[in-house]
Structures are given as C-alpha cells and as structure tokens.
Image (cartoon, rainbow, N blue to C red):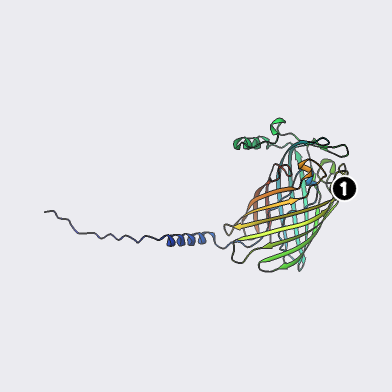
Amino acid sequence: MVNEGPRVRVTVPPRLSIRQFIGCGLLVLSLLLGNAARAVEPLYGKNLTPVAGLFGIPSARSAALLSTGEVAFAAHGALASHAVFDASAFEALRLDGETHRLALEWRYAFAPGWEFQMELPWLSHSGGSLDALIDGWHSLWGMPDGGRDAVPRDQLDFRYQTSSASLSLRDSASGAGDVTLALHRALVDDSEWQVSAGLGYKLATGDERELLGSGAEDAFAVLRANWAPAGSRGQLFGQAGYLRAGQIAGLQAVQERDLWFAGVGAGWAVHERVTLLAQIDAQSAPLQSELTALGAAALLLNVGARWQVSPRWALEAGFIEDIRVETAPDVTFQASLRFTP
C-alpha cells in the first residue's frame, strides 16, 4: 500500500481573453506614452540646389503665432549633397559638391495677433566628404548613382552654360547669406485651427559671385494653416504662397521671376515628448530650361522627428529627398534646435 501523502491544491489563474489582453496592452501603452503634445510646428527645410537656393522661398512654419511680448528663436543646420550632370542641344549643367547652411531664426510677437520674424543664414559650398558614403549606399541597394562614378569624388564643380546665361563656382566659398525679414498676422486662432498670413522680404546681403546670395531682393506673400483635432495625437499643416524674385546677375535671360510654392504635412505624437513628421514641399521652376533640374517644378519629401527635451527646448533631426529627381539635392541632412516660451 502506497502512502500518497497530503494533496496540494494548485490554483490556475483564468486565461485572459483576447479582448482583455488588448485592453491591458492599450492601458500599458497609454501609461507609457502619456498625453500627446499639441504644439504644431512643421520641419524646417530649404531647397539648397545652387540655383533654387538663391531665391527667398520661405520654409514651412507654424500658422500659430506667439503671445504678445513673447520671443522664440531657433538654429537650423543642413548639409546637402549635389550630383547633377545634364545637357541639351543648347544647355549644359554640372552640379557636383556639397552645401552647408546654418540659419539663426528669431521671432517676436510685438502686438496681439502680430509677429515679426528674421532669419540670418550662413552658407558654405565645397567638395565635401559624403560622396563615398552615398556611393556605398547606392551600391548596397542597387540604386542608380546619377553619374557620380564618372567624376572625381569630393570635388566642387557648379556650372551652368547657355548662349545667353551662365553660372559658375569651382572654388570653395563660405560666408553670410541673404537675410530674410517677415511680418505675420493671425487670421484664425482657436483650440483646433490656426490660420495666418505673412509678407516677407529677402535682402541682397550674400555675395552673388560665390553663390552665397542672389544679388537681388525678393518679396513673398504666404498663407499658412494648422489643424490639431481635440483628443488626437495627429496634426496637419500646410502653406501656399507667391514670390516675386529680383533679377540674378548672369541668369536674367532665362530666369523665372514669378514663383509659386506650397507644402503640406502631418505629425503624429508617439510620445508626449516625441513627434514624427513628414511633409511634401513643392516650388515652381527657377529657370526657363529644358533640363529637369532647372526647368521643372521641384518636389521634396521632408521626414524627421522632434524631441521635446523640456517644455521650452526641442531638438529635430531628419532628411530631405528629391521626389522629382534632380530638382533638389540628392539628399539633405538637417537638424534644428528650438526655444519657445
């Protein structure tokens, strides 16, 4: 006869249903993410091709203005790699090199519903150092290199030639760019929608001989809008405007002076401190040209993320790709530091 000893009762917890499991997961996720940030601010971005970059087309920005007496500032850095080699029966274009740009931005709300903005840029054109990295990336994914393998790496060669117009830069150059001033007026400002209008003026402060500026003044008008639905982590924003360009020395015969620009984008707060953003920006062609790089409207994809380091400070990082190939730099890497009151 075998003594089985005392019996032990084992309690098995009931299984969670799929609905309960999903509910617990959503609860944990909401606790981790907290409340999403509601501020709407598009990514900063410029088309830094040596020709289009001369014009004073403004970057996307929030339609929401500061409260009276408040001051905000930001520093925007960008590194663009150019690789365009094209020609027609009457034109020849070579854009091989890199452009670095640093812009300091200052905003001040001097009255209810009114804001003044100033941007001070610094630029550098050089042979750069990204060719090997970009060539390796193209090779890894089997992507076309746009003719990069046919020219020496890390050289500067910006040239455009027709029978009536020309542009050239083959030696490294750096210095102050064209300063931009703008005045903004709030049109709609409620809990979900903001709409504002702006007028801007680009001064001829950069050296046009080194492609640091256009050597001419530009003026623009722009309308912007934000939408951030209550209770949503998403946000939408957009802008549309017109720019009247001054005449650029050497390009007057082929230059377009009446330019349009537009952009639309969205943001999604994946965390109370982190927002993912994507936007598409477009602008009309800078020149009357048969070449895509100069004679077709530019289409750019701007993708990045913003990290709200503290209630007043934010860091951004991202990149810009030319959706319409050759109408913008091959790739632009960018980062921003923002302070808002």
Instruction: Tell me: 111 left or right of 274.
Output: right
Vertical order, 293 against 218 (above or below): above
* Position of residue 195 measured from the top left corner of the image (x, y, whole percent): 73, 64
Q: Residue at x 70, y 34 (%)?
A: 148
Query: In this orientation, which residue lies closer to the viewer: 132 or 229?
Result: 229
Vertical order, 112 against 206 (above or below): below
**Image quadrant containing the C terminus:** bottom right
Amino acid type assigned to the residue bearing label 1 in the image? Gln
Q: Pointer 1: residues within 10 angstroms few (<14), some, or many (20+)?
A: some
User: Outermost residue, left direction?
Assistant: 1
Does the rendering let one see residue 341? Answer: no
* Position of residue 124 measured from the top left corner of the image (x, y, whole percent): 76, 42
* Position of residue 31 measured from the top left corner of the image (x, y, whole percent): 51, 61
Vertical order, 298 against 229 (above or below): above
Instruction: Tell me: 205 left or right of 34.
Output: right
Q: Which residue is mark 1?
A: 247
Q: Residue at x 86, y 51 (%)?
A: 217
Q: Residue at x 80, y 41 (%)?
A: 290
Instruction: Tell me: 143 left or right of 108.
Output: left
**Image quadrant containing the N terminus:** bottom left
Label tally: 1
Query: In this orientation, which residue lies closer to the viewer: 224 or 81?
Result: 224
* Position of residue 233 measured from the top left corner of the image (x, y, whole percent): 59, 61
Does the rendering let one see residue 186? Answer: yes
Image quarter of residue 254: top right
Image quarter of residue 18: bottom left
Query: In this orientation, which residue lies closer to the viewer: 28 or 94?
Result: 94
Q: Secondary structure at mark 1?
A: loop
